[in-house]
Every structure is written in structure tokens, then in C-alpha cells.
Amino acid sequence: MTIRKTTCPEFSTRYPLLVKNLMNTPLYMYPDDIAMVFRSSEGDYFRLTWRQWHERTCRLANALKALNVKTGDRVAAMCLNHHWHMESIYATICTGAISHPINVRLAPDHIAYTITHAEDKIIFVDRDVLPLAEAVYDRIRDNVEAFIYMSDKKELPETKIRPLYAYEDLIADQPKTFDWPDLDEDTHAVLYYTTGTTGLPKGALYTHRQIYLHSLHLTMTVNTAPRLPDDPPRPNQPVPMMNIPLFHIHAWGSPFFNVLMCSKIVLPGRFTPEGFCELVQTEKVNSTMLVPTMLAMLLEYEKIDDWDLSSLTYVNIGAGALPLGLKQKAEKRFPYMRVGSGYGMTETYDGVIRAAIKRDMAELPREEIDQVMVKTGLAFVPAIDVRVVDEQGCDVPKDNDTIGEIVLRGHWIMEHYYKDPDRTAEAWRDGWFHTGDAARIDSEGYITIVDRITDVIRSGSEMIPTVLLENLTSNADFVLEAMYVGVPDEKWGELPMAIVRLMPGMEATEKDVIEFLNWQGVATGKLAKWMLPVYVAIVDEIPKTSVGKHNKKEVRKKIDSFLAAAKKMQ
Amino acid sequence: MTIRKTTCPEFSTRYPLLVKNLMNTPLYMYPDDIAMVFRSSEGDYFRLTWRQWHERTCRLANALKALNVKTGDRVAAMCLNHHWHMESIYATICTGAISHPINVRLAPDHIAYTITHAEDKIIFVDRDVLPLAEAVYDRIRDNVEAFIYMSDKKELPETKIRPLYAYEDLIADQPKTFDWPDLDEDTHAVLYYTTGTTGLPKGALYTHRQIYLHSLHLTMTVNTAPRLPDDPPRPNQPVPMMNIPLFHIHAWGSPFFNVLMCSKIVLPGRFTPEGFCELVQTEKVNSTMLVPTMLAMLLEYEKIDDWDLSSLTYVNIGAGALPLGLKQKAEKRFPYMRVGSGYGMTETYDGVIRAAIKRDMAELPREEIDQVMVKTGLAFVPAIDVRVVDEQGCDVPKDNDTIGEIVLRGHWIMEHYYKDPDRTAEAWRDGWFHTGDAARIDSEGYITIVDRITDVIRSGSEMIPTVLLENLTSNADFVLEAMYVGVPDEKWGELPMAIVRLMPGMEATEKDVIEFLNWQGVATGKLAKWMLPVYVAIVDEIPKTSVGKHNKKEVRKKIDSFLAAAKKMQ
């Protein structure tokens, strides 16, 4: 007698939310469309259709199986953005292993630490990052079972790293199909490390279910966002360029939602203004993601008029607040372009707050919309709950003034730090994840980040809103970027210092900065007089973190040299 | 000592997919916008903002709690579409009970059966449906604990039904907040009964998770669908009119995805062409859902030119195939309007296949797009897997010719029939839900429904494609609607009969039907000569089921009277 199952929850009520299912959409809808375009640093182009890309991914999955990769194993990638990287992500995750993109901009010590902490079994490496892999090799060699060299050549470079397999060689004879397993949706899929600005990097794990739900909510939210009357039409074919490295939270989840959206994914090697412009022009890129520094570099690029960038209608700014000045300069320079931003962190996978208008604002004048869009934004409802709370965990008043800490819960909030219950317990308290970011909230629900709780400048008993000062200062025509830090002071605790980088070719003095702030800040009621910077330093370079954010920690370390360069204004 | 939880999966990796979360979006984004507009059959208007509607829903949830409604209890509604119905759905589901919308178009016997089978504890009833409730009262009174009368008046009508509470009276003194519980996402939320054309109605249960995922995928899919160059712009504010009764699978999930989309939901009482036109004009309705019969009624409505319907840019047709002729007639009559359709059944909650173009078709001429849009369509990837299989369960060739059965699995396929393991086992076999619908599939993945497996006309060893014949016939200018059934025949098994209703004011004969089919079907290669109807009957009325579909079962019962009215053509 055979027992027949009469219900199938695994195919109905419990049909699992798996990363492999994201591939079904392009494979069903557009198998012969171009899925990915990679432009190498030498300017060579590689193109794959969805069918080709999927076959290569299946071959790689078979190869990983032959290398004994099992569910839960960590498989790392130490490389730039290219189709090999995209293949390795899907082959790793969809077989049940965990993809760990190694942040190659960390200090070698921290890189070695994350590899050891993650217990990576396999590491993918490409030519650009090979020297770095060699630099840390002696510290990781005992734990890593195999390295795979990503290149279109079957030959291997001379290196001490071993065993080292050539990617194309490894997959050449493997079958081009793979029976992707029906995993539990709570299987871990990815492991990302924080940049460790406050100690050793911490690992944030995410599951298949979290990634799937992020892709779905993000795609829904982007496509239902209210449109302004003069917005360019939304293209039927998304052509995003992935300018954020995949080793930063997989470029905020790009490999996943872009596959769901059947995008033509444009993968540059290293970011250069020239490579960027060439790809926009040749591939008709219509959206991209940048950190503020990259956008500033584009605005400085002297040959920008040689290129046709008119297809590029949307730029998403992350990893740092978007200063209004930078947004306005970019949109003035490229009138067809809209610049938006969001807020997230390694522990929140991607955005949890996004700059957005409400639909009843669509007819407002442009300047008023800019004022809305430059706020950190609105919570990612209904996927994510966001609150701004005081030290007792109570909501602060929605007066856009009282400062509290942002706390979160929802689908793509990290559950725990990998192998670190103590730091998990610091972050998850009373059922809310504590971000350590200070913010205020207004009566419409708009949230504005003020600072890292630890970066707030405390002058007397007051807190100085550094993000507001940075935004205001960067509005000045002559300012390219601006940062504020506290200078230790016996009487006040801290005094505010402005560190300013000028627009190329512009002349301005420290006094111009103060005058601009008086005119646009104090006179308009945005700033109190006591908030004005006591010191102003005009510099050639502002230190950045590995993700391109202003590195306040570094500036504080070297505060004496910045003070030496600064002028005291009061 | 207090034990502190150091991970919070219930707020991160396992953050539940619950219907209550759908309400968060409008309550956060647009609390003071109009949520719902109800126009009663008398022409009275009722309007509620999201805040008001939510407060009323909270009051009702408190009232249900006071009536001892518990998780898993069935709470039924026997009424038309209005805000009371919408409130009852959310108050029921979000407290953990199961919402059972009673199909008031079933025969009284079947209505009593579904109430008894569901073991409904509470029944909501409105004035329109009260006589029907009274008609079945004696058969259900022993099991139902309370009835709630939906009306803006606090007075109760004279009736034998008891206990009967006045809705507004019941909620008046209840608190306007409710602490919606954090349910398990696999909690059952809704119970829908099939129309029972093949026996007693069967109950299909769905969970919170299924409803949430349906709303999310649907919203994403609708908003990422490729746009044609001449498509009207998609409005920032969706204003759908709910013309499908909520007692049909909750109007295909309307209360859920429309809340997620912060739509202004327009609720008509009974469908009349005049009421429909008034609401479109006054509320600037921009989308609606209709069964083909309703669309045909609008085309016949003599005063249609008195109204401004130009806001209505999208009409979704369901509960029956959309004949190309009807689509073209409607789009010619209303040039700003696009008519689409989908395929689903009670056991699939809403659509699992939808008429859609692929983005590379967007520039095709209109006639070619119509030919694509009139196919049943594309599977609802990645949420739903659709296959067309032969009797051995193997995929039929993708030749758009071989006929097989549609089988399904995915997020919104029913897991089991309520209290009916035998019929569940008939439907769920080998991990696939068997629809009983016959279809073919082409090389692009487009699926075309041919017929119910049981409605297929078998002539000799061949199957006659009735849906194709019905579509072709309705293309004729003079045809309003057409249906095909098999007439028993000793030699052939069955012979095809066309039953045709003419456009108002049009004159045509049985011979015209055959000539049109020869010209547009046989001559173009769409039909083989032997498929032509042997009998043609021109009638004033084609029998309909309670959901407005052609009732082939009824026609087969009365086949002799249709044969008497028909003309033999061969």
C-alpha cells in the first residue's frame, strides 16, 4: 500500500521564499535577453543572456558540489563586480551554502580576521584583488580548502596561493543544469561584516526568506512611488549600473532585486568617471547607485560633456547622507536625472528609510520637493517598523526637534551577529534593534538622521546637529563637501569645527563659509547662532572610510593637524 | 534574575506576514486621505478616511471580542460591498478569526449548507440580503450564535432572526484602538466556497501569509508591467471600483492589495450601468474589475454618452475568458481604456495566469498586441509555478497545439478543502494542484485555456476548442456573446452547437454566423472545417452562473429546448 499525501503545504501555504525562485522570472520571461554586461578595467566587454548566465551558474554549482561544499558552508568572494561574482553568489546561495563577500577595503588585519571568523571554506579571487589575497594568505591558509581564480583565461597566475583552480577550467566540463534544492526558507544565505570602525568587524547573517522579501518589497515600493509631473517616464527595461561594490552588503541587495526585475545588469570594474560615462552611453544605463563621493567625482570630471548621459534618469545615493547642495548641483548639471537616497546599515541589509514624497506633494514647486527629498525620509512600511525613542524606549514627540535613537524591527533586520551573543544583546533590546543613530521625526512621519549617537557634538548641555550643518554648508556654490567634528574644549566639552573642500576652480575663504551659514542658516531660522562652527578648515582632502563615507574617527585621531590648518572664527 | 533574549527572530528573520501589517501603509502615509467611498442603492454617499475607517474597525474588533469570537472561529458576511463589509473583514481576520463571505447567489440549499459546513459563529447581514437570510434561517439558527445588522441606522428591522445586533449600536461604545495580536502567519484568515457546479460547494482556506504574499506580488507585478507607448499615464492615486462582489473570493483579494496600495476604494451597492457611471464620474475612478457580462451591459447602456468616464483607464475582466471582440468593442468605444484579464479559481485565490505583453512587444502594432492580450497569458512568476501536462503528468510540447491540463503550485494555491480530505486528494496529486482546466502552451510560455476538461466537446476522437470558437464568434460585429456546447450524437459522440446573443439593434442570421467563422476562422487557418458548429441557436439570453459565467451545465440540462431553437447548418 502506498501512502498518498493529501495536502501539500510545502507547495501552497508554506511554499518557501527562496533566492532560487528569483531566477524564475527572467528565465521564463526573457531567457534570450542580455542579463549582464561586464566592462573590465581594460575596456573589454563581456555579455551573457539569462540562459547563458544560468547555465554557467549551474556549472559552477556542480563544481562547488564536487569541491564538497555543503549546506551552511561559507563560500567567500574577494573580487570586484563582474559576472563571475554574480554567478558565484547564486551558485553558492542556491545550493544552500552561505555567500560571504569580503570587503577588500578593510585593513589586511581585519580581512584576515573576517575570513577566519567566518571559517570560509572556499574563496573566489580575481586578478585585481590577488595581491591582497597574497598579503593575508599566511594567516588564512590553514582554514581555506580551495581558492578559485576568476578570469576569462584558463591559465593561472604565478602565486603562492594554493590549491588554486581556474574558474573557466573548473566549470568547463560540468553539466549545464542543476537541480536547485528546496531549502528551508530560514536557511542562511549571506554573511556581511561591518567595517569595524568601533572594534573588530561583526558578521551579520541573512536568510533566503529575508532576501526574497526584501527584493519583493523594494521592487513594489520603487514602482509604486508617486511620480512628479516632470519626471522622465519609467523605462520598461531597467538598466542599472552596479557602482557599489558587491562586497558592501552585495551592493545593497542588487543581485537579488535586479534579477527579479529582469534588469540588464551593467557591471563596471573599478569606478572611474570615464568608465562610468562610457558604460552609461553604450549600454543606455538608466539607473545607478553611487556614494556621495562618486557623484562629487563625476561633477568634477572635466570631460563629462563628451558623453551622452541622457538615459541616466535615476541615481540612488547611499552610504552617507545626501547633501541638498550635491543633489541640486547634480540635477542642475543633468536636468533629466533625479537623485534620491536612503538610510540603512550592515545590520539592516539595505534601506529601512528612504527619501520619498507623498503623492499629495507631487504638484509642489521643485524647491519644496527638494526640502522633502533631502530628509532621510519615510520608513519602509509595511516591511519595516521604525521608531525614534528616548533613553527609556518611549517615542519622542513628532515635533521634528526632539532627538532620539532610531530603533527597528522587520523583515530585513539582522537577527544576530554571527558567533557574537554579547554584541547581539547590546543591539537587540526589548524586541527592537538599536541602530545607534540619532534622529528626529516630524508630524508627517518623516525622519531626519542627526548623527551617529557617538558622533553628536555636545557643546555645553546642547547637541549640535552636524548633519544639518553639513547639508547647509554643502549648499554653498563654492563647496564640494563639508564635514563637522567636535574639537575637545575644557569649558564647553566640545566646539564645532567645519572641514570644507571647495569646488574645483572656486576661490573662497573661511569667512565666506561663516557668512554663507549666517545668511542661509541663522537668518532663515534653520540654525541658532551658537551652532556656528568655531573653527573652519579648508582642505584638499577629507578622509574617507572604506565605503566612501566621511571618516570622522580618522579626523578625530588627527584633530591636531586639522586644528593647525583651521582658522578660529569667534 | 531576569533572562534577556539575545535574538529576536519574531521581529527579524521570522517577522510574520500578517494581514494587519497591510493597514500600516495607509495609516502611516495617508491617515487623513479618503479610504473608502460607498454609494448605496438609493444613491447616498458614505466617506471614511483611513483613520476613521481604522478606528471603526478597532471598535468592531472589540465588539467581536465581547461576543466571545476567538482565534479560528468562523465569522461570516452575507451582504453586498460597502465599508461595513470591509470593516468586518479586517476586524475578523486581524483578531485571528476566519472571514467567510457567503455567496448570496448560490441556491438557498447551498447557502445553508456552506453556513453549516463552515460552522459560522457570527453572521453579518445587510438590508439587501436580509430576506435571503430569513429564508435559510430555520436551517442555520441552531449553530449561529449572533447576527449583526449592517446599516447606518441604529434601529433594527422587523425579523424573526435573533439575536440580532445593530452594527452601529454594537460598536458605538467600544474603544477606538485595538491591540492587534501577533498571530502565527500560518493562521487561517479566509474561507471561500466554490459555486458547487459539480456537487456540493467546497471550502477553500487561505492563511495570513498567503494573503500578504498575494498582495505584495500582485502590486509588484501590476506596477512593473511593460507600458505601451500610447498607454495613459499610471495615476499616483489608485481609485479602484470594486464591482465584483466581496463574496466572490473577496473580489479576488481586493480588500488586501488595495489597502497595501493606499487606494481610494470605491464601493458600489448593486451593479447597475447608471450607478457605475455616476461613481466613475464623481469619484474619478481609474480602474475597475468586471465580469464579461457587466462589460457587455455597459456597451448596451443607451445613456452612456451622458457621463464622463475618461478617468477609467483600466478594466480587469475575470470569472470568464475575455473574448477579443468584446475587448476591441470596449476599447473602440472608450479609447482611453485598456481591458485586461486573468485566470484563476476559488482554489487559487486570485489570478495565477494573467494576460500580459513582454516588454519587447511594446512597440508592436495594436492588432498584434491584441492577439497577445487575448491569450489567457503568462504564469504569475515567481510566485506561482504553472505547467500544462498530459495524463502521465509530463509537460506537453510548447507547440501551442497539444492540449493538456493546467497544474499549479505556489504561494496562493489552496492547501486543502475544508474538512474534505477526499476531494483534496483528487486535486493535489504528485505535488501539483490539478485545476481540471484544459490548455495549450506556446514556445514563449503563453498559455491559452481551451476549456474545462469536462466541458471539452469531443467529436469522434478529436477535441473541439470551444474557447477559441467562442472568441472567434464574438469578434463578429453583430455578436454580443457566444457559447458552445456539445450536443449528444450517436455517431460522433458530440456535435458542436453555437448559442449566440446578438448586439442590440443588430440583425443577423444563423448563416451569418457560419459565414463569419468561415471567413475569419477557416480561411485564416485558425479553425479546421470540421470544427464549425453543426447547430446554431440565436437566443435572447444565455444562462449564467451566480458569478456571471456562462452556465454550460444549465444549458446541457435544457439541451432539448436549445436544440429546438437552433438551426442545423450541415
Image: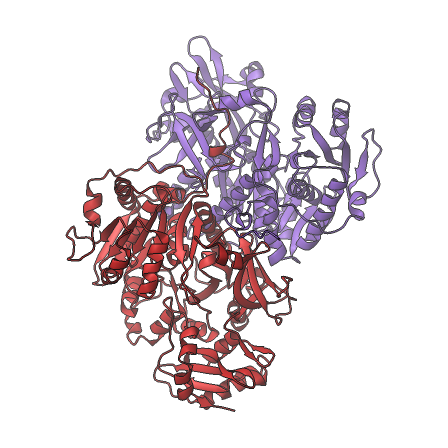
Chain colours: A purple, B red
Residue B23 in picture, x, y percent from top left = 37, 44
Q: Is residue A250 left or right of residue A566?
A: right
Residue at the outermost front position: A1
In which image quadrant can residue A156 be found?
Answer: top right
Residue A512 visible in the snapshot? no
What is the quadrant of the N terminus of chain B in the image? Answer: top left
Q: Is residue A323 left or right of residue A247?
A: left
Q: Nearer the viewer, residue A275 or A251?
A: A251
Q: Nearer the viewer, residue B355 or B418?
A: B418
Residue at the outermost top position: A490
Q: Is residue B88 left or right of residue A219?
A: left
Residue A229 in picture, x, y percent from top left = 41, 53
Residue B154 in picture, x, y percent from top left = 16, 50
In the depicted structure, whether residue B527 falls above or below residue B362:
below
Residue B381 in picture, x, y percent from top left = 55, 55
Residue positioned 29% across, 62% down in the render:
B279
In the depicted structure, whether residue A178 falls above or below residue B361:
above
Q: How many dots with numbers?
A: 0
Q: Nearer the viewer, residue B140 or B370?
A: B140
Q: Is residue A174 left or right of residue B522?
A: right
Residue B459 visible in the snapshot? yes
Q: Nearer the viewer, residue B394 or A408?
A: B394
